[in-house]
Image (cartoon, rainbow, N blue to C red):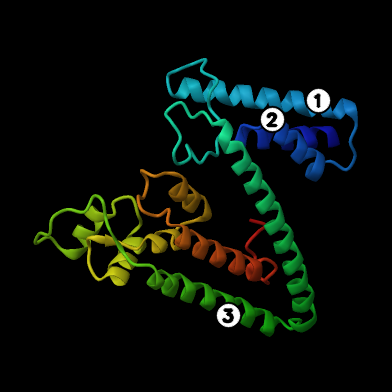
Amino acid sequence: KRDFVSAGAAAGVAAAFGAPIGGVLFAMEEAASYWSQSLTWRTFFCAICSTVTLNLLLSAAEQHFGELSHPGLITFGSFLGQSHSGAYQLQELPVFALLGVAGGLLGSLFNFLNRKITIWRSRNFTAPSTKFLEAMAITVLTALCCFTLPLLVPCTDAPDAPEPDTAPDDVQAARVHPRESDLANAMHRLLCGNNHQRSNLGSLMLSSHEDAIKILFHQTALPGVTNISMSLLYFGFSFIVGLLTYGVAIPSGLF
């Protein structure tokens, strides 16, 4: 039974991200209480079968049966600057290595600081009322940051903005930002003062982390959001708020 759990975890990760080896490593680290060489080959075979089966089903769904080129169920698409073929260049590998090192160092810093905060929180926030007030304070802080931080970055003209007309404001806003939610459109109007400009940082603030990654990776999704200073500001916001939020007394799940 434990072998089935390990194999199932590896197959799920492999199908989600199109990474059979990553699925095996995840099962080894998180889903298994013991490990052996025979279990390695079993979980790897299961992960391979999962990836191939998913590719066949996706290729059939897109009417190109047999094309085993689908990366998985969760994908962020092509990166900025890639050619149509999607091939990486040799000179990009050192940049990828530096990104990996930076991510590891920042992850270690996050874990170190969060451990300190968790110990302090367990000593000082013991009563249910204090835990509730802490959750409310973090909620208010997050909402204030989502509104005030976009004010630091100037608005930019929407690339698909229509000419002014006599249509209602909400209709014009929907035309200007058709790919965004009603809340995001209202925030753009509030921050920019008109229907023909977009607050790029506001778009990031009001998106989920998955959508924010897609915005930063896809130049055609929301042009103009790749400003370095704005990206660093968004990173600082996500890092600090995530640091404070992880461990707070709310039933939000692991992710």
Q: Which mark is residue 20?
A: 2
Horizontal and vertical percent position of residue 70: 53, 27
In this figure, what is the number of numbered marks? 3
Residue that label 1 marks:
42
**Amino acid, disc 2:** Pro
Residue that label 3 marks:
137
Spatial CA distance of label 2 from label 1 is 12 Å
* Quadrant showing the N terminus: top right
Q: Assign a secondary structure to mark 3.
A: helix
Horizontal and vertical percent position of residue 206: 43, 62
| Relative depth, front residue between 246 and 98 | 98
Task: Relative to 159, say whether 65 is above or below.
Answer: above
Task: Tell me if residue 1 can be seen.
Answer: no
Mark sitting earlier along the chain (2/3): 2
Q: Is residue 174 left or right of residue 117?
A: left
| Relative depth, front residue between 3 and 14 | 14
Residues at marks 2 and 3 touching, judged by CB atoms closer than 8 Å: no
- Answer few, some or many: residues within 10 Å of disc 2's Cα (few below 14, many 20 plus, some between 14 and 19): many
**Amino acid, disc 3:** Ala
**Amino acid, disc 1:** Arg
Spatial CA distance of label 1 from label 3 is 48 Å
Residue that protrudes farthest toward the left in the picture: 166
Mark sitting earlier along the chain (2/1): 2
Q: Could you tell me which residue is drawn at 51 percent across and 18 percent down?
A: 67
